[in-house]
Image: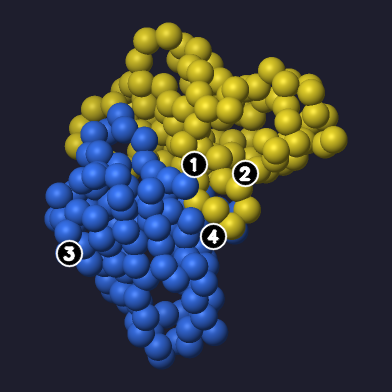
Chain colours: A yellow, B blue
Amino acid sequence: AQSVAQPEDQVNVAEGNPLTVKCTYSVSGNPYLFWYVQYPNRGLQFLLKYITGDNLVKGSYGFEAEFNKSQTSFHLKKPSALVSDSALYFCAVRRSSGSARQLTFGSGTQLTVLP
Amino acid sequence: ETGVTQTPRHLVMGMTNKKSLKCEQHLGHNAMYWYKQSAKKPLELMFVYSLEERVENNSVPSRFSPECPNSSHLFLHLHTLQPEDSALYLCASSQDRIYNEQFFGPGTRLTVL
């Protein structure tokens, strides 16, 4: 079985400050990891993914995430938050082997950037 | 936009009605997915189609019936739903490789009275 935990339902940060949205995962074997963002009344938009290689992955809108195998974490970060970053963020994991297409999502973290 | 469209965007139906949700992708992908998103819960994968064949069905009640007539279109037929089926239904598509990201439509907000 595979699972994702996003331990914070809500993260508040002041505009211009760095932000971190936490994600830990559990999967047998090597993981493929994804971050998505959802704005109100919209579907999920892909931000970035880790497949292999460099543990620091850069994505859209200035976001990046660091894969840490020993801590089974894939935290999302941005050096300077914008009010427009306020949205719901989802982490997701999939096994890197096997044919199953199951992408398991976390329950989401609501990010609010305060002006 | 993501290249995945869904209609209708909002749907209110009674428990005895029959309705269908439609999804269309313009990305040339060969896999399509239905997800259910309920408040405060993780996204639940309902069905996966690859090359127009259903390849995954995650114990979804039979009152939900998917159809994939071609690689660009996906339907979710609904009948005799329950109030607890009220949710946001999301369609997604991807190239069918396990490392590929999925592209999501805006969703259909379904309310069952």
Chain letter for the residue marked with disc 4 in the picture: B
Is label 2 in a helix, a strand or a loop?
Answer: strand
Q: Which circle marks residue A88 in the picture?
A: 2
Rounded to the nearest angstrom, the CA distance separating label 1 from label 4 is 18 Å
Q: Amino acid at mark 1?
A: Gln
What type is the residue that disc 3 sits on?
Answer: Pro
Q: Which residue is mark 4?
A: B38
Q: Where, quadrant-wise, is the C terminus of chain A in this rendering?
A: top right
Are the residues flagged by discs 1 and 4 in contact, CB closer than 8 Å?
A: no
Please name the residue that numbered disc 1 is placed on: A45
Name the residue located 27 percent from the left edge and 62 percent from the top edge.
B74
Viewer-side residue, B31 vs B37: B31
Q: Chain of mark 2?
A: A
Is circle 3 on the same chain as circle 4?
A: yes
- Spatial distance from mark 3 to mark 4, Cα to Cα? 27 Å
Vertical comparison of A29 with A9: above or below: above
What's the amino acid at mark 4?
Ser
Question: If you read the primary sequence from the N terminus, does the residue marked by circle 2 or circle 1 appear first?
Answer: 1
Which residue in the structure is indicated by mark 3? B69
Name the spot of residue B84 as percent of width and height, x first. Answer: 51, 73
The chain identifier of the residue carrying mark 3 reads B
List the single residue furthest toward the top. A54
Picture coordinates of residue A25, whole percent (x, y): 48, 29
Please, what is the three-letter code of the amino acid marked with disc 2?
Leu
